[in-house]
Image (cartoon, rainbow, N blue to C red):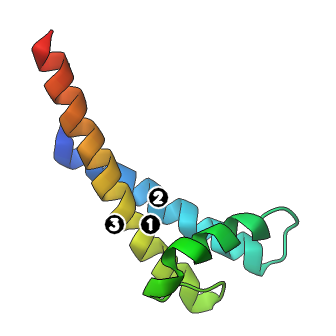
């Protein structure tokens, strides 16, 4: 069964956006254990405007969506190519 690349990429983008936003919110609420992960996000997205702040929730969600869309889209393309070779 082939994956619908566009829909799979869209769902991956939404998933990554939600993860980045929730991770930033939890870190802002100072929930123990989440700061190291947001520091990692900050090292990746920091040059593109992300910070652990209220506005960072939206910037992180934006870049998370872009990254998830690209990664899941590439995965779906490769998956469809591999199953077509069977």
Q: Residue furthest left?
A: 84
Determine whether the residue tagged by mark 2 lies in a helix, strand or loop: helix
The quadrant of the picture occupied by the C terminus is top left
Query: Is residue 26 among the parts visible in the rendering?
Result: yes
Residue 42 or 17: which is nearer the viewer? 42
- The residue where tag 2 is placed is 16
Q: CA distance from mark 3 to mark 1?
A: 5 Å
Q: Residue at x 25, y 47 (%)?
A: 73
Callout 1–callout 2 Cβ contact below 8 Å: yes
Disc 3 or 2, which lies upstream in sequence? 2
Q: Secondary structure at mark 3?
A: helix
Residue 8 visible, this angle:
no
Instruction: Check contact, mark 3 vs mark 1: CB within 8 A.
Output: yes
Image x and y of residue 52, in percent: 66, 84
Residue 77 image position (x, y, % from top left): 18, 38
Residue that carries the numbered disc 1 in the rendered image? 64
Depicted 61 relative to depicted 76: above or below: below
The numbered dot on residue 66 is 3
Q: Position of residue 69 (x, y in %)?
A: 31, 57
Residue 80 occupies which quadrant of the picture? top left
Labelled disc at residue 45: none
For residue 19, above or below residue 75: below
Q: CA distance from mark 1 to mark 2?
A: 5 Å
Q: What residue is at 40 percent from the left and 75 percent from the top? A: 62
How packed mark 2 is, by other alpha carbons closer than 10 Å (few <14, some 14-19, many 20 or more), is: many
In this rendering, would 57 be left or right of 62?
Answer: right
């Amino acid at each position: 069964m082939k994956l619908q690349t566009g829909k799979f990429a869209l769902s991956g983008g939404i998933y990554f956006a939600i993860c980045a936003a929730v991770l930033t919110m939890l870190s802002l609420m100072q929930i123990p254990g989440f700061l190291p992960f947001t520091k990692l996000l900050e090292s990746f997205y920091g040059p593109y405007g992300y910070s652990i702040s209220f506005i960072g929730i939206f910037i992180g969600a934006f870049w998370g969506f872009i990254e998830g869309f690209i990664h899941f889209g590439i995965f779906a393309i490769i998956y469809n190519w591999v199953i077509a070779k069977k």
